[in-house]
Image: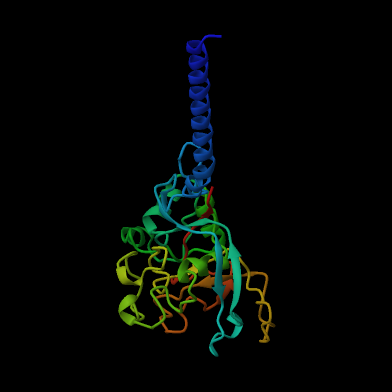
Amino acid sequence: MSETKRSLRLSIFILAGILLAGVIFVVALVTIFMPVRTKNVPSAQTATGISTLPAAEIIDAKGAPMRLVPAGDFIMGSDDEMARDAQPAHRVSLPDFYMDVYEVTRARYMECVDAGVCSDHLNVPDLESYFKESNFPMSSLDWEQAKTFCEWRGARLPSEAEWEKAARGTDGRTYPWGQEYDPAYFQADAGGSHEVGIYEKGKSPYGMYDMAGNGWEWTADPLTVYPGNQGDHSYYRETDRVLRGGSWDHPDRTVVSTWYRFASNIADNSGYVGFRCAKDAP
C-alpha cells in the first residue's frame, strides 16, 4: 500500500472518529438537559402545551358568573367560645368546584319561572312589585324551590363545607374580607336587603359577594355534628337544612362570621332567606 493511500485512510478514520464523538456529545447534552426543561413545564399541561386547569371564572349556560374554588384543605368551624355547634375547628378537603359570584337575583329566578320550571309561589304580598327589584337577592322561597332553580341551571345547592370554604378561603379567617369585624364591608343594620354585589371590599378570597349579610343562604346539607363537638345535639333534625352567612335581619358580628351555623326547616320561605348555586369543576 502506497504512502498516499495509507494517509488517506488514516484521515478518513480520524474524521469518522470525530463525527462519532460529536454524535455522542450531542446525545449526552440532550440526555442531561431534557429533564431540566421538562421540570419547567407545569404538570397541568398536556403535550400540546394547553392547560388542563379549570378556568378561574366561568359563565354558566344560563349566564350566571361563577368563580373557581380550588381543590385542597381548609379550616372548617371554630374554637371560638361563641361557636357552639361550629366547634371544634377541623380540616376538611374538597375537590375543585365553582360557586356563584352573586346570590341568585330575582331577575334570574324569574327566568326559571318564565321557562315553566320554577314556581312563583312565594311568601310575598305582591309578585309584580317584588320582581321589579330585579337585582335584589331572591328570597321568600323554600329549600325545594332553591334546589329546583339550581338544577335548572345545571348546578346544585352547595354543601355546607363548600359554602364555608368559598367564604373564608384557606387561612381560617372569621369574615369573608379578613379577620377583623368591619361594618363598612356589609350592611350592618336591619334595614332590608340590598342589591347584590355593591360591597366591593366585602368579597370573599375567591371573589364572591355578600357572603356576609343580605340574605341567609340555603345549603344542601342537614345540620350534623362536627367530629369532637361536645354540645347539645337534641335539636338537630333531618328535616332542617343548614343556612349560612347571616342576613339583613340578622347582621350580628357573630352571625355573619364564616363559621356560624344556622338551620331551618326545608319549608321555611322567610323574606330573609336566599341562596346561591355551586357545581363541580370538570
Q: Residue at x 33, y 81 (%)?
A: 183
Q: Is residue 243 left or right of residue 179?
A: right
Q: Is residue 198 left or right of residue 63?
A: left
* Image position, residue 116 (x, y; %): 48, 45
Determine which quarter of the picture holds residue 198.
bottom left
Q: Nearer the viewer, residue 65 or 141?
A: 65
**Furthest residue in direction bottom, as rendered:** 81
* Image position, residue 52 (x, y; %): 50, 45
Q: Nearer the viewer, residue 135 or 87?
A: 87
In this rendering, is residue 16 above or below 55?
A: above
* Image position, residue 278 (x, y; %): 51, 57
* Image position, residue 44 (x, y; %): 51, 48
Q: Is residue 222 left or right of residue 25?
A: right
Q: Residue at x 41, y 68 (%)?
A: 204
Quadrant, the N terminus: top right
Q: Residue at x 49, y 63 (%)?
A: 141
Q: Nearer the viewer, residue 222 or 173?
A: 173
